[in-house]
Amino acid sequence: MQVNGTAYRSIWLEDEGRSARIIDQTLLPFQFQTTRLTRAGDAVAAIADMVVRGAPLIGATAACGMLLAVNEDTADQHLRSAANALLAARPTAVNLRWALERMLPALLNVPAAERFDTARRLAQQICDEDVANNNAIGDHGLQILQQMAARFEPDRPLNVLTHCNAGWLATVDWGTALAPIFKAHNAGTAIHVWVDETRPRNQGASLTAWELNAHGVPHTVIADNAGGHLMQHGQVDLCIVGSDRTTRCGDVCNKIGTYLKALAADDNEVPFYAALPSSTIDWTLCEGVSEIPIEERAAEEVTHITGSDADNRSVRVRVTPQGSPAANPAFDVTPRRFISGIITERGVCAASEAALLALYPEQVEH
Ligand code: MRU
């Protein structure tokens, strides 16, 4: 995607694979700044501190982190401990495990002298595949948006609600939930996006709004609690969200608050889609509510809020009384019964084990 006229991915290799560069997402929307990763530990910190975030990008960063680990030391023990540290950085997004399961065995299976080239090739492949998969998700989702838009007068914008940030910043490029929206806008379909602010870290208000603004897509930021009201009043035609982990039975884990939007959508007969690449599907799990580990993040993310002052300097202020404890579960699970369809790189299917396996028959043995 373009930033000030330059095409960017959210992560890329530099110095022939001796380093990787990322966009510092903690500074957006106020500053656009890139950061260099040179050690595996830099990748661990970038993931844990949410300098990079979003399940597909977390997976790509872990793959690049393994390349940086090989650059430090090719020994088996070093690679295993780098993989363990990366895996522990964030627990919910399954793309992290998926990327490490591709990288580590491939590296251990080749002689030390070949490990750097193998890691560089695989890390680049994981990044490129993510771009291709999200592009395909965009094409499949576009058909849904255009079919729905065809029911209305051409000038009447299709109103789509999204939660958190599932745009290009959450992936290597294109995004998951936002890919069909970018494509619809590019194709001239009138579209307007309701952007949930997404407390506590405000990925909607700061990142989704920044992406849509940069791309010229009409949008309105709303408080997290506004979606149900808008749905009751016919102002939302459909919802599209991303996912951090989707079970083989179709339960969708995503940013905290997604479940409440799905409940409101169900009550108001608003279609509710999840868009995700197959790297986000955990084929080992079925019942998301009981089986998916939910990350509990620092209470300070709830008790404090970050914004910018008149001079564009970042300011962090407390919004709760001193002494009030806060809880911060970062994700929730939307049961499959509330999901109208899952948009993958191979097409759109029902949120069910049978439908997902029909798209991915090679996963039947799990
Ligand atoms: O905590 P984050 O910002 O890494 O969480 C990301 C999300 O939950 C997004 O909603 C997204 O849909 C999943 S990644 C495309």
Image: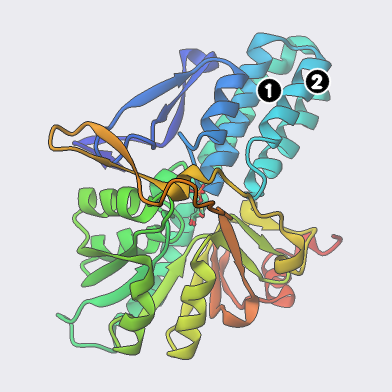
**Residue placed at 74% from the left, 12% from the top?**
74
Check the image and report above or below for 89 versus 328. above
| 270 sits left or right of 29 in the view | right
| 168 sits left or right of 157 in the view | right
Where, quadrant-wise, is the C terminus in this rendering?
A: bottom right
What is the quadrant of residue 331 in the picture? bottom right
Where, quadrant-wise, is the N terminus in this rendering?
A: top left
Q: Which mark is residue 110?
A: 2
Going from N to C along the chain, the mark reached first, 2 or 1, is 2
Q: Which mark is residue 118?
A: 1
| 114 sits left or right of 262 in the view | right
* Residue at the outermost front position: 323
Label 1: state its secondary structure: helix
What is the quadrant of residue 144 in the picture? bottom left
| Residues under numbered marks 2 and 1 in contact, where contact means CB atoms less than 8 Å apart | yes
Which x, y percent locates residue 218? 20, 64
| 207 sits left or right of 37 in the view | left
How many marks the image carries: the answer is: 2
Which residue occupies the foreground of this view, 276 or 147?
A: 276
**Residue placed at 45% from the left, 28% from the top?**
12
Residue 217: tell me if it is visible. Answer: yes
Q: Amino acid at mark 2?
A: Val
**Residue placed at 32% from the left, 65% from the top?**
223
Alpha carbons under labels 2 and 1: distance apart: 8 Å
Check the image and report above or below for 361 versus 32. below
Label 1 neighbourhood size at 10 Å, few (<14), some (14-19), many (20+)?
some
Check the image and report above or below for 230 versus 305. below
* Residue at the outermost right position: 365
